[in-house]
Image (cartoon, rainbow, N blue to C red):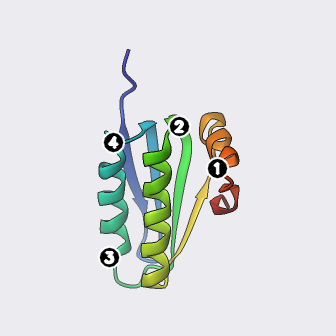
Amino acid sequence: MLDEFDVRVDGGADVATVAVVGVLDLDTGNRLFDALAAVLGREGLRRVDVDLGAVTMLDAAGVGVLLAARNRARTAGVRLRVGNLSEPAREVLKIVGLLDIAA
């Protein structure tokens, strides 16, 4: 059975939350990156919170999307926080030494 993937964006003008549901991998990473790029293009945005609480699997491509989004956010002067980690997301970020991107 395949996990359903979804990206939900919520929030106001200065803070946005991007919630990810399902498998974040090579097949779905572009959808997350596109959503984050659109959010990061907002005028007056100060912070983006990426909620990984409903991520059922995270692979290297998904980690790459998170890092690319963090770099884009820095360039835009926006703080990007990754939080509410599911156990699969936490384990992968721990293994690759990137728990520091989590809020």
- CA gap, disc 4 and disc 1: 20 Å
Q: Where residue 6 sits in the image (x, y, percent)?
A: 36, 40
Disc with the residue nearer the chain's start (4 vs 1): 4
Q: Where on the picture, by quarter, is residue 83?
A: bottom right
Label 4 Cα neighbours within 10 Å, binned few <14 / some 14-19 / many ≥20: some
For mark 3, what is the residue? 41
Q: Locate the C terminus by quadrant.
A: bottom right
- CA gap, disc 3 and disc 2: 25 Å
Q: Where residue 65 sits in the image (x, y, percent)?
A: 42, 56
Disc with the residue nearer the chain's start (4 vs 3): 4
The answer to whether residue 24 is left or right of residue 37 is right
For mark 1, what is the residue? 96
Disc with the residue nearer the chain's start (3 vs 2): 3
The answer to whether residue 50 is left or right of residue 44 is right
**Residue type at mark 1?**
Val
Disc with the residue nearer the chain's start (2 vs 4): 4
Q: Are marks 4 and 3 in contact (CB under 8 Å)?
A: no
Secondary structure of the residue carrying tag 4 is loop
- CA gap, disc 4 and disc 3: 21 Å
Looking at the image, is mark 1 or mark 3 nearer the viewer?
1
Label 2 Cα neighbours within 10 Å, binned few <14 / some 14-19 / many ≥20: some
For mark 4, what is the residue? 28
**Residue type at mark 3?**
Gly
